[in-house]
Structure formats: structure tokens, C-alpha cells
Amino acid sequence: MALELRGVEAGYGGALAVQGVSLTVPPGSIVTLLGPNGAGKSTTLRAAAGLIRPRAGEILLDGERLDGLPADAVVRRGLALVPERRELFPSLPVLENLSLGAHTRRDRAAIAEDLEMCFALFPRLKERRAQPARTLSGGEQQMVAIARGLMSRPRYLLLDEPSLGLAPLLIEEIFRKLIDIRARGTAILLVEQNAAAALEVADRGYVIETGQIRLEGTAADLAADDAVRETYLR
Ligand code: ATP
């Protein structure tokens, strides 16, 4: 049982952005994928979410092959992506943005339960549920994006740079919620530029550079690693 990428290659046109990436996200854990701009982090997440088709390798979700499936089918199998820059519908109310996260589901009672769970996790979203998403602060919009991901009731949640553009206090607030989400049984693959914040909440981590995994280990080992400290924690 796990989300597993095995030798995944993916790219755009003639260019291979991800060159044989293997990584494992055990159930109920937070795993972070660190690396510089353009290293292939977002491409790795997009491949796992079925938004781009890997050119080689395998992606398994609790033993079942995901690669080659369309994005909707991947969501139905229990994996949701919270994309970089959030990609909300700015003129739609918060509540409708959240409902869109449940568009693959028909179990109304369970959807209502999950909405309440999201409001318990992010009480400010309940207060602002009727407001258009664009009127929310950056931090609140990130909360909407995460909650929308949770509305598909995923076992695995992929987060692409949730700290982007947020003030340090808000980053802390949002990262604490990731621990709550893990406690509810959803595993997280967290892509981050903010390595310090990511290593504080993660169980394990990987460092990707120019499309290849260069280092992996427990979050504590990575935080103590000289190369990681020099490049990502200064
Ligand atoms: P960032 O933090 O800047 O998003 P990243 O590690 O997520 O970096 P990717 O977005 O996966 O990196 O990009 C990996 C490579 O693929 C880069 O060279 C990038 O220019 C290229 N790339 C990304 N998206 C596209 C696209 N839609 N079309 C063509 N090339 C792309």
C-alpha cells in the first residue's frame, strides 16, 4: 500500500523534464519533494495526477496502475492534486469552488460530511463561503484550494507549493493543517521551495535536481544534511 512512482519519465514536446523518478508515499505520511526552480517537481505531480502521460515508468496507487488513466479516473481512485497558483474559479463563491472538488462523486450525504470537515479544518472558509473566491486573501485562497482537493475524499493529496506568495505566519498556519490532514488518514506529497517549512512537517523527503532524484531520507536526516543545508536551508 502506497503511492509509488517507479522510473517515471515525463516532459513537454521534445524535452524530458523528469528523467526516471522513483519515489514512495506511504499511507498516512507526509513526504516532501524539494528542489530548485525547473527541477521537475510540478511535472512529477502532474504525471501522478494523470494531467500528463508519462513516457516511461509506472505509477501505482495502493498496488493499482494509474499511469495512462485520465485525470478524472485518477481522482476517483483516491488521488487529488492541489495545483500551483491554486487555479480557483475567481468569480464563483467559495462554496461552489469546494463543490467542484466533489464533481466525481454522487454520495451526497458523504459529500456534505466532507464539507463540514473542511469547514472544521478551515473555519474562515465557513464564514466566507458565499464570497467570490477572488475577494479572499492569498492565504484563504490557498485554504480553498486545499479544501477543494479534500472534497474528493482522497487517500493521497498532492500539494504544489502551498506556501507560494504567503506571509510566514500564514505558511505556519497552513502547514499545521497539513498535520491535521495527515491525522485524518490522508497522505500528502508536498512540493515546496520553502524547504525549512516542509521538513518541519514531513516524515520523509526527496531532493530532485534537473529531473532526477539526488537525495532521499527522513526529514530529520535531510534537515541535517550539509548539501541540503547549504542549498535549501540558508
Ligand atoms: P517550479 O518551482 O519553477 O515550478 P518545478 O521543479 O516544478 O519548478 P517543472 O515545472 O516541473 O519544475 O518544470 C520542469 C521543466 O519543464 C522546466 O525546464 C520547465 O521549463 C519545463 N516545463 C514546465 N512546464 C512546461 C510546459 N507546459 N511546456 C513546456 N515546458 C515546460
Image (cartoon, rainbow, N blue to C red):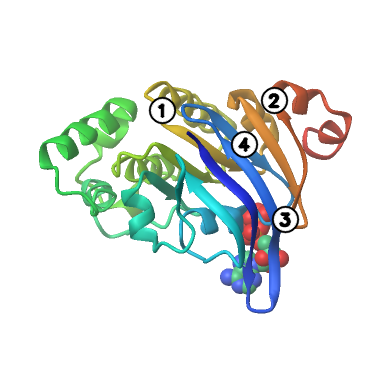
Disc 3 secondary structure class:
loop
Three-letter code for the amino acid on which mark 2 is drawn: Thr
Q: Earlier in the sequence, mark 1 or mark 4?
A: 4
Q: Amino acid at mark 4?
A: Thr
Amino acid tagged 1:
Ile
Residue at coordinates 25% horizontally, 39% vertically from top-left? 128
- Quadrant of image for the C terminus: top right
Q: Cα distance, mark 2 to mark 4? A: 10 Å
**First reached walking from the N terminus: tag 3 or tag 4:** 4
Q: Which mark is residue 218?
A: 2
In percent of the image, x 39 and y 36: which residue is there?
155
Real-space Cα distance between discs 1 and 4? 15 Å
Residue placed under numbered mark 4 in the picture: 32
Amino acid type indicated by mark 3: Ala
- The residue located at (62%, 36%) in the rendering is 32
User: In this figure, which residue is indicated by the disc labeled 3?
Assistant: 39
The percent position of residue 85, horizontal first and vertical second, equals 50, 54
Disc number lying in front (2 or 4): 2
